[in-house]
Image (tube, helix red, strand yellow):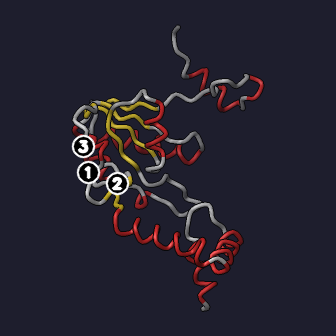
Amino acid sequence: MDELQQLADALSLLPGIGHRSAARLAMHLARHPDDAAAPLAAALDAARRNLAVCSLCGNVTPRAANPCRLCSDPRRDASLLCVVEDPGDIPLVERSGEYRGRYFALMGRLSPMRGDGLGSLRLPLLLERAKDVKEVILALDGNVESEATASYIRHALAARHPTLRVTRLALGIPAGSALSYSDPVTLAGAIRGRTVL
């Protein structure tokens, strides 16, 4: 296999990069070795050497700071555990400014079509972490696979920790949006998750 194809194959392993995009990126890197390829190679090598996955939550952290700063912060509420699908979801929740507990990244969701089953999730670690908390907040996406994942996790947590409170983020209409743009599933979630004013 030639080097260009090998590079394209490696790039296509990244999420969101298909074979065509990978081929274009590989060609660009080959045509611009000093401007694009060298800085990319250096950044990848530095990331490989210096970054790790947090041993508690799964977030990306400097290798020297493991557990991560969110897991190590004594000011955070250790009785709350927010479960997300991907570590990239953690900064999104943090930006809300409303949550001050701990996190746990599943590293995926149940997806039989993609072959992602229970073995691809960090469910045993979640069940272990849940023994020390009062509430688990499921902050998963609103699609069918995520709903199935949330349902499975809720049942697994209830079986292992019967007194644990398991909640789900409210689903509803985005701020600044009109009812006429809402799909029936989103609108139904908004009605079910309504709050008292």
Residue appearing at x 73%, y 22% in the figure: 179
Residue furthest to the bottom in view is 1
At mark 2, the secondary structure is: strand
- Is label 3 in a helix, a strand or a loop? helix
Q: Quadrant of residue 26?
A: bottom right
Residue at the limit of the structure toward the right, as seen here: 180
Look at the picture and state if 75 lies above or below 192. below
The type of residue carrying mark 2 is: Thr
Of marks 3 and 1, which one's residue comes earlier in the chain? 1
The residue sitting at 48% across, 49% down in the picture is: 88
Q: Position of residue 133 (x, y in %)?
A: 26, 35
Give yes or no for contact between labels 2 and 1 (Cβ–Cβ under 8 Å): yes
Residue 63 horizontal side relative to residue 197, left or right: left
The structure residue drawn at horizontal position 43% and vertical position 54%, both measured from the top left corner, is 107
CA separation in Å, label 3 and label 1: 6 Å
* Amino acid of disc 1: Pro
| Residue underneath mark 3 | 72
Q: Quadrant of residue 153?
A: top left
Mark 1, residue position = 67
